[in-house]
Amino acid sequence: MAKIIAISNQKGGVGKTTTCINLAASLALMDKKVLVIDADPQGNATMGSGINKYRVECSVRHVLIDGADAMSALVTETNGAYHLIPADDELVAAEFKLRDSMSREVRLKNALEPIKDNYDYVFIDCPPSLNYLSINAMCAANSIMVPIQCEYFALEGLTLLIDTVDKLGREVNPHIRIEGILRTMYDNRNRLSQDVSNDLQNSFGDLVYRTIIPRNVRLAEAPSYGKPAVFYDRSCAGAKAYVALAAEILEKELLASSS
Ligand SMILES: Nc1ncnc2c1ncn2[C@@H]1O[C@H](COP(=O)(O)OP(=O)(O)O)[C@@H](O)[C@H]1O
Ligand SMILES: [Mg+2]
């Protein structure tokens, strides 16, 4: 059965998209079948997977608004590692249309029903705001992964997200839970990074992944080559960290299934 994970944080620039495509690539390297859904109108997960968002024929917008089936929107990332339901440059408009449509919270969930079991993991890259695109992502998901940039104000966004998850749990998706909290852009020379990281561990314990994603320029360069860093430079510290995260996730699951 597929595990559907929304990657979300209402703060922008915390590493959601970087995590989404690099984790997808890392799990694909481990022979997992992976689907990425780009639910952010910025289309960064689409471009970072080597798909031109200005030339997409069938996107997540068509699936959400026009009722196109999810299968017809599937494309393959340039290295052939994972499937993608891309965003296009008109996804912003779709968000407005969603507000007036029937079953506006569960359109993505319903659309994924026929294809989800073709995958081991489905990652949904969320926009940095709470709108109907992110609500669709969270209704379709089993859990939420929260990347947190290890800097000041990081915890503020997290409190907001936890409130949102509680609300969603009460109102639309009672099974939703936080999958894990991921420390990103960590700089071990920076005292603030260490303090935020310690605070997270003290407040959230085992919910915080052991793996920490370091600040690494290769992670930032890779999207301009249309590749996750895991394919752009497999040996860089950032890529290695995402591969380690994938291994940690698989290990966690193995432990959960044997207990
Ligand atoms: N660990 C990292 N080290 C260095 N740069 C990073 C790292 N993670 C992300 N970036 C860069 O920071 C910016 C924001 O990251 P992104 O993943 O797009 O965040 P979000 O999706 O949350 O807005 C991007 O330019 C990205 O390439
Ligand atoms: Mg993003």
Image (cartoon, rainbow, N blue to C red):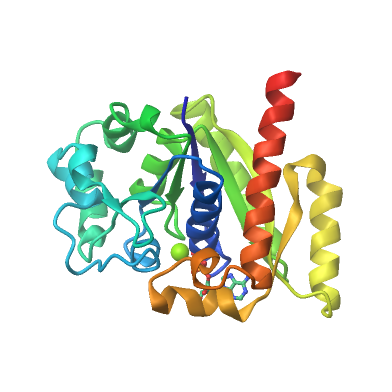
- Residue 255, picture quadrant: top right
Looking at the picture, does residue 83 appear above or below residue 103? below
Residue 193 lies in what quarter of the image? bottom right
As displayed, is residue 71 above or below residue 58? above
Q: Is residue 117 left or right of residue 186?
A: left
In the rendered image, the vertical position of residue 224 relative to residue 90, given as above or below? below
| Res. 100 in view | no
Q: Is residue 191 visible?
A: yes
Considering the image in quadrants, where does the C terminus appear? top right
- Residue at 22%, 66% (x, y): give it: 89
Residue at 16% of width from left, 52% of height from top?
58
Q: Nearer the viewer, residue 256 or 178?
A: 256
Between 85 and 233, the residue placed more toward the observer is: 233
Percent x, y of residue 219: 56, 73
- The reply, left or right, for residue 19 in relation to residue 53 is right
As drawn, which residue projects farthest toward the top? 259
* Residue closer to the observer: 101 or 179: 179
Left or right relative to 69: residue 212: right
Q: Is residue 74 above or below residue 4?
A: below
Q: Position of residue 66 (x, y in %)?
A: 13, 43
Q: Quadrant of ligand 2?
A: bottom left
Q: Which residue: 50% across, 72% down?
A: 232
Residue 144: x and y in percent read: 56, 42
Please give the name of the residue rendered at 60% of the width and 33% of the height, measured from the top-left corner: 177
**Rendered image quadrant of residue 91:** bottom left
